[in-house]
Image: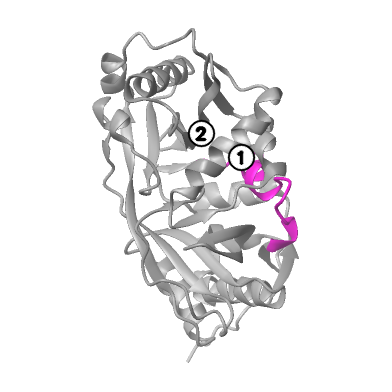
Amino acid sequence: MNIQPMELFDEVVNPDLDEVSALMRANWTPPCWLYEPDLLAMHIMRPTADPSMAVGLRAKSGELASYLAFVPLRLRIHGRIYKAVFASFFTVSGHYRRHRLSDRQQGLMVDRARDRGYEVYAAVTVAGTPANQTVARAFGARGLPVRAAYNFRYLAGARAIVATRLGAGAAGNVRPYAPSDEDVAFALLSEAAACAPLAQVVEREDVDFSLRGRPRIKTYVYESEAGVQALMSVSLLPVLSGRVGLNAYVEALALGRLEPAARMAFVDAVLRSVLLEGAEAIMVPDTGRADLAVFRRLGFRAAPRKLRLLLAPLRTDVTDLPETVDGFCLDVF
């Protein structure tokens, strides 16, 4: 019998993001967003993040073989705040799949989070993909349950459809976000998060970075005589699907203070600006956190890919997590 020896891998903390981006591009199946180094950095290097929770496994050849980032955050679930991590950017090189790197990488990061005192794990996965089983095995081996807490899809708006439905907008009330808007932006985003049974706690030190300081981000506010009343932030993301195109992704949305007519005018104006940037499609995660009727009126429809929010305790004494939630307010990246 020809038994191939298991290769040893070295743990590498916060590997070079050019290398991580190349690993993703070589192994993710199109269509997928193309996470170039600057786009990875906007999540992994944000002010309240911890780059030491982004870890890879390197083969003896020197090649980065797998990668997974656990992004720290405070998570409010039904009024209680937990010290949590959001798992993202999970990638394993096809060259090393026989080494069960998926399980090794997940287990490594779960143990790392547990050792550092984190209480709750959250992630978004595509329904039916092997990643779901990998996560379940990592937690099952530690006697911890994983819950599929919420199923959802993106709303997608194709340029050819959305462009024909946009109105004149309300350009006089809409302007780009400015540093002086930080206080009201923090209030607006906190209000939007407060409406969801599961939500990321908005951190003041992340607000200006998230809305203005990141690459490829466009943030707009709606300002009336009463001051800034709404906010919408959009990332322009390259997408790999046979070729490299450009999608727009709604990152932050706070419309709760606007009446329906003003809400429609604001979204019209922002999307008109986004289409001028060359976006071929616009994506909005339909996580139950906000009224997305304005997007449906503009021709947005549910994308075919089914997603799920996974939730799991990282400690045996965390026993009060819900099996499901009615919606959530959390970055999906």
Q: For label 1, count other residues whose C-alpha is less than 10 Å away and answer few (under 14), some (14-19) or many (20+).
A: many
Kind of residue at disc 1: Leu
What residue sits 51% from the left and 78% below the top?
138
Front residue of 63 and 224:
224
What residue sits 60% from the left and 74% below the top?
110
What residue sits 62% from the left and 61% below the top?
70
Is residue 101 shown to the viewer in this render? yes
The quarter of the displayed image where residue 302 is located? top left
Kindly state the secondary structure of the residue where label 2 is placed. Answer: strand
* Residue annotated with mark 1: 39
Residue 63 on the magenta segment: no
Is residue 177 left or right of 172 when viewed as pictured?
right
Separation of residues labelled 2 and 1 (CA atoms): 8 Å
Give the residues drawn in magenta, as a range.
34-53
Is residue 295 left or right of 36 when viewed as pictured?
left
Kind of residue at disc 2: Leu
Q: Position of residue 8 (x, y in %)?
A: 68, 77
* Residue annotated with mark 2: 237
Q: Position of residue 35 (x, y in %)?
A: 56, 42
Q: Is residue 86 above or below residue 210?
A: below
**Are the two marked residues, 2 and 1, in contact with CB atoms closer than 8 angstroms?**
yes
Front residue of 64 and 48:
48
Q: Position of residue 228 (x, y in %)?
A: 56, 23
Q: Is residue 260 above or below residue 108?
A: above
